[in-house]
Image (cartoon, rainbow, N blue to C red):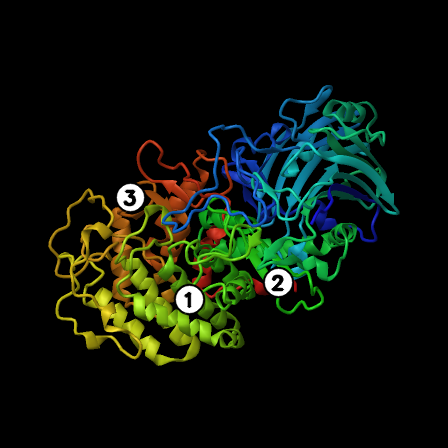
Amino acid sequence: MITQLCFYFACCLPLAFTLPQDITSYPLNLTVSGSQAPSLPLAVRNPYLSAWLPGSQSNDLPTAQAEFWTGQNNDIPIFQPGVVTGRTNNLSAAEPEPRTSKQSQQTLGWTILAQVDGKTFTLFGAPNGITNAKAAVQKSINYSSTHTIAKLDAGAASIAVDFFSPVSPNNYLRQSFPLSYVTITVSGSSDVQILSAIDDSWYGQQGNLVSKYQNTGATSVISLTDPTATNYTVVNNMAAWGSVVFATSQAGSSSVSYQSGPNNTVFNKFVDTGSLDGSSPTYATGNLIAFAQRLSPMPFNSTSSVTFAVGQYRDNVVNYLGNDQVGFFKSKYDSMLDTVDGFLNDYESAYLESQTLDKAIFNETGLISSNYTDLTTAAVRQCFGAMEITLPASNTTDTSNPYVFLKEISTNGDVNTVDVVSPTSTILGVMSPDWIKFLLEPIAIFCESSAWTPEYVVHDLGTYPTATGRTANTSEQMFLENTGSFLIMAYQYQRLTGDKTWAQSHAKLFRKFADYLETNGLYPSKQVDTVDSIGQSANQTNLAITSAIGLNAYGALTGNKTYTQTAQSFASMIYTQGLGTNLNSNGTTVAGIPTHSIPTHSLPTHSLPTHSIPAHSLPTHSTPARSLALHTTPTHFTYNYGISTSWGTVFNLFPDQYLDLNTFPAAAVSMQCSWYMSQATSVGIPYASVQNNIANGMWDMWIAATCPTDVDTIIGFEHSFFTNGKNTVPFPDRFYVSGSQAGVYVTANARPTLGTTFALLLGKGVSFAKYLST
């Protein structure tokens, strides 16, 4: 199917609403300083609308350039529908989305100018300056959960530039808008004009765009159209179908003008006249499309503002099992222009909601520490910017059961990856628990289809935005991790919402998953855990622990005590009887454990091996700097059974505690917490003995919520990494903890997994739902 691709720049003349007074000056006491963040969100709403400000440029907004989440140019092949790139059969390790050796930035053309009393100033996006324009003087930059705000002086005017991406997961319509706001507020001068412009770098593939200007009543439109665009085509991680949207609305603006053309032509016209001439020549790659507004005269000590919106509009957003999914906004708005108008008209309500949410997060996290506030506040837009809430294109009137699709940004590009949904569920638990079901439901439906025959949970649904499923050969070999985590999340959803009907609707499937854990969970076959870059090995303790907790979650979910007893027997063998601790050092199963200690209602005897663990199935473990003395009590869980010097992060002890499952006793948790601290470097906690130079920040936040005496230390590690100035990409979740690269991020950035920063609040039972509109 061929669809037209347009860049739409909609200029909406004065709308029916007026901005409330408090909108013109966002309360900075609800924000934190952004000067040390690795990257600040500017326009972050979905995987294709993801514009960021590198931290290294955050103190000089006039010369700074927005970047896509990648932070670098990527020579990535075009992803065509039905073709999976970057994945091989029988994967044993994640394959990061390919990067070129070039270190040039994948910038997004976006410039904002102000003319004050006849003199032109650059506010944003002019790295090489502009002829006859002077850079405004930046005074500060701050961020909240939903806003990034810079304050500048430009001649006699004081100017605030507010980049605002709403986060409203309980208002599905508002959250689904594929658009973001930027508002420029001016005080101190009565003669001000504002220009804002973008170019075709916001679209995945340049070179075939046709320009057309239209005016329809109150809305002016410039479109850049690619007549060959095909749904679900992705280039360099960017959408190459749909429409890039740039709009402006300003009640009280005395005039609006537009222009398309080369940078110098457009800028010179604005510098000379304070307006644009309405010309729109044949579009050439790199040309600007711009709007200028002359603000109405302002009384002394008052302010005036203009709001723009930038976005990425697609009629169809995800291909789910061969059927088109559309944004939830399609339940109300049929066209792009209607959607833009709806978004601009929603500004006041969205803004007021954002203040309420930002205040609640700021105050609640501040009770723990200011460092914690910095981390959680930075994670909010990043998390929700990886997801889209949708409806079937065939039925947009039934809004009762939407789906949410999540992109595994920066690591595989997969859709609804179970071990990525799991950490993301942390922030959903405190914001909108229904989203846990919305993410898991597409997975459950696929696993119930004839296309999926294994007994375990599929790893993911495909490569974003094509969620057509996997086969046993193309699904990553992460059987126990995914199956255990899925059941844990299913119980998390039921416990937080009280909804038992969802689990009941999938009773047969969930029972199949639980039976798989029971049969295969105690002695894991060769496979990967969530850090798949380590590679496959058998008899991983953490996978057995996840299986035990998953079984216990299933028992709680259904009230079936038999599975609860199986979980307790697993835990007894792993911890109490030492199978998964450093006391089991001879490479065999623990002696003296009778087969009947495990309930055998469906557990085959062959799952209880008595032979030695094959050496070839075990990874090579680094030897800790300190030698292990002989112990009569265990000091830690091992990474693999029988290797006493091995160890790993046992992150699912957090949901085991906060869901009151208590599969493992408090002594086991205390033991592991002490071990983490003994292995920490001055920079952070390594993930495992087999990866002892890399910290996994997303799971470290679950550790912090599990280990109450170590909260400040762990938050300190994460905050030091976040603010060390060594990284300029959106909040990464992995970093080196030793050597010359200590504090430098590793591959994974801009991912929703840092929803785990909210684990401390989730564990305390905090909910922000009451601060969110519906």
Q: Which residue is mark 2?
A: 170
Looking at the image, residue 208 sits to the left or right of residue 692; the answer is right
Quadrant of residue 406 within the rendered picture: bottom right
Q: Amino acid at mark 3?
A: Asn
Task: State the separation of the CA atoms marked 2 and 3.
Answer: 40 Å
Q: Quadrant of residue 252?
A: top right
Q: Earlier in the sequence, mark 1 or mark 3?
A: 1
Is residue 79 left or right of 276 when viewed as pictured? left
Nearer to us of marks 2 and 1 is 1
* Amino acid type shown at disc 1: Ile
Q: Give how far apart the Cα atoms at labels 1 and 3 are.
A: 28 Å
* Residue 107, percent from left and from top: 59, 32
- The residue at 55%/40% (across/down) is 69
Quickly name the residue at label 3.
692
Q: Position of residue 57 (x, y in %)?
A: 55, 31
Label 2 Cα neighbours within 10 Å, binned few <14 / some 14-19 / many ≥20: some
Using the rendered image of the protein, determine whether residue 660 is visible from the camera's viewpoint: no
Task: Please name whichever residue, 600 or 771, is drawn nearer the observer in this view of the structure.
Answer: 600
Q: Quick check: 250 above or below 55?
A: below
Q: Can you see residue 489? A: yes
The residue sitting at the left extreme is 630
Q: Give the position of the C terminus as an image quadrant.
A: bottom right
Label pair 2/1, CB-CB below 8 angstroms: no
Residue 527 or residue 497, whichever sits in front: 527
> Disc 1 marks which residue?
488
Residue 532 screen position, x and y as percent: 37, 49
Q: Residues within 10 Å of mark 3 (few under 14, many from 20)?
A: many
Q: Secondary structure at mark 3?
A: strand
Going by the numbered disc 2, the residue's amino acid type is Asn
